[in-house]
């Protein structure tokens, strides 16, 4: 059975991909989020000129903010779509293998995060207990750029998006 993944689900998935904490090889304790260098923390902006949204269209803009909180990393995503609509999504997650609740996304109600290494993470997006999309997030070693590759379906079409983000200085 195929599940439809809308633009809001894509936004959510991209948020979750940035919840990886570089530099930690196992699930960190809450205190370690702020005490260790974490390339993810801060604000990231979509670079539409370096991104590819197939079949499209690309959002006009997207701003992601990641901050350490007691039970993981809080991700907040604000998106302006090509038609002018806006969305807001928020989640707090950790790399403990558990499902984490998603707020503000009608197409996804949970995510599971897997850390591959200190710069790469994988995410599965779930709705009603079924995986509806997957994504892979890579942060460059200098911590200035992130790329998220998203695979799933949107509006009944196969989607293969590559979103590139630059970190605010």
Image (tube, grey):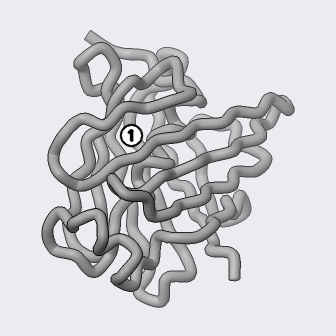
Q: Quadrant of residue 101?
A: top left
Farthest right residue? Answer: 84
Q: Nearer the viewer, residue 21 or 85?
A: 21
- Which residue is the site of mark 1? 151
The x, y position of residue 53, in whole percent, is: 59, 45
Image vertical order of residue 1 relative to residue 116, above or below: above
Image vertical order of residue 169 relative to residue 16, above or below: below
Farthest bottom residue? Answer: 142
Q: Nearer the viewer, residue 89 or 147?
A: 89
At horizontal 77% and vertical 33% (from top left) the residue drawn is: 86
Relative to 34, 6 lies left or right: right
Image vertical order of residue 52 relative to residue 30, above or below: above
Quadrant of image for the C terminus: bottom right
Quadrant of image for the N terminus: top left
At horizontal 45% and vertical 64% (from top left) the residue drawn is: 68
The x, y position of residue 44, in whole percent, is: 63, 65
The x, y position of residue 144, in whole percent, is: 56, 81
At horizontal 69% and vertical 51% (from top left) the residue drawn is: 62
Q: Secondary structure at mark 1?
A: strand
Q: Nearer the viewer, residue 12 or 48?
A: 12
Q: Quadrant of residue 132?
A: top left
The x, y position of residue 145, in whole percent, is: 55, 75
* Residue 119 visible (yes or no): no
Relative to 52, 129 lies left or right: left
Image vertical order of residue 84 relative to residue 138, above or below: above
At horizontal 51% and vertical 63% (from top left) the residue drawn is: 67
Relative to 75, 136 lies left or right: left
Q: Nearer the viewer, residue 116 or 54?
A: 116
How crowded pointer 1 is (Cα within 10 Å; few <14, some 14-19, many 20+) is rated as: many
Relative to 58, 9 lies left or right: left
């Amino acid at each position: 059975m195929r599940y439809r993944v809308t633009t809001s689900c894509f936004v959510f998935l991209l948020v979750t991909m940035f919840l990886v904490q570089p530099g930690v090889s196992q699930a960190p304790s809450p205190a370690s989020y702020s005490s260790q260098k974490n390339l993810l923390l801060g604000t990231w902006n979509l670079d539409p000129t370096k991104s590819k949204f197939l079949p499209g269209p690309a959002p006009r803009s997207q701003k992601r903010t990641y901050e350490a909180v007691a039970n993981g990393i809080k991700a907040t995503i604000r998106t302006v779509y090509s038609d002018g609509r806006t969305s807001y999504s928020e989640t707090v997650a950790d790399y403990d293998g558990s499902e984490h609740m998603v707020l503000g996304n009608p197409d996804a109600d949970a995510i599971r995060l897997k850390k591959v290494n200190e710069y790469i993470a994988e995410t599965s997006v779930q709705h009603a207990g079924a995986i509806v999309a997957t994504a892979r997030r890579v942060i460059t070693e200098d911590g200035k750029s992130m790329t998220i590759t998203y695979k799933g379906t949107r509006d009944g079409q196969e989607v293969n998006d590559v979103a590139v983000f630059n970190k605010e200085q």
